[in-house]
Image (cartoon, helix red, strand yellow):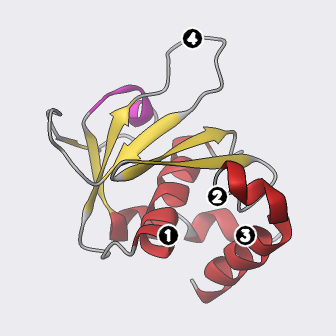
Amino acid sequence: MKTFKTALLLAALAAGPALAQGYVPNERLTYTPTENGVRISGSTGFGARGHWCAAAGYAVDQMGAADRQTLYVSEPRARGFGGDGGVTFTLDPTGLTPSPVVILGGSLTKAGSAMTISHGITLCGGLQSPGR
């Protein structure tokens, strides 16, 4: 976990001027702050698991969220081809019908998909294996 946070911090510092356009912790993702959340665009290379991990990390590191809080998909990824594949996550469930994530694969295409930040952080562990 400490390695993940350190890597995010170093990548964010290296991003320099890109920070003016949104929080960019690596070359694959663009983080754009929204009211009570963040829009994450780009490919993690790890599918939905990577996006939930990224959203949870952002919520803790940039929004000061507690790990017991819940993240919700407020603007899902468009189905099919085209678009940037962006997903907007929020800490505010207002206007959503929360649905706990059971299967990660389709969770980014359904508004209201919900996961605790602590669960999202646990998904980060498998993303840091050697060779990745």
Which tag, 1 or 3, sits closer to the chain's start?
1
Q: Nearer the viewer, mark 2 or mark 3?
A: 2
- Report the side of 6 relative to 58 (left or right): right
Mark 4 belongs to which amino acid?
Answer: Gly
Say whether marks 1 and 2 touch (CB < 8 Å): yes
**Magenta residues (range):** 106-111
- Report the side of 76 relative to 1 (left or right): left
**Residue at horizontal 65 percent and vertical 63 percent from the top:** 127
In reply to whether residue 80 is colored magenta, the answer given is no
Q: For mark 1, what is the residue?
A: 62
Separation of residues labelled 1 and 4 (CA atoms): 31 Å
Q: Nearer the viewer, mark 1 or mark 4?
A: 1
Say whether marks 1 and 4 touch (CB < 8 Å): no
Give the answer, above or below, for where 74 lies relative to 54.
above
Q: For mark 4, what is the residue?
A: 80
**Residue at horizontal 39 percent and vertical 30 percent from the top:** 75
Picture disc at residue 23: 2
Query: For the N terminus, which image quadrant?
Result: bottom right
Separation of residues labelled 2 and 3 (CA atoms): 24 Å
**Residue at horizontal 62 percent and vertical 80 percent from the top:** 5
Mark 3 belongs to which amino acid?
Answer: Ser
- Report the side of 51 relative to 98 (left or right): right
Q: Can residue 132 be seen in this snapshot?
A: no
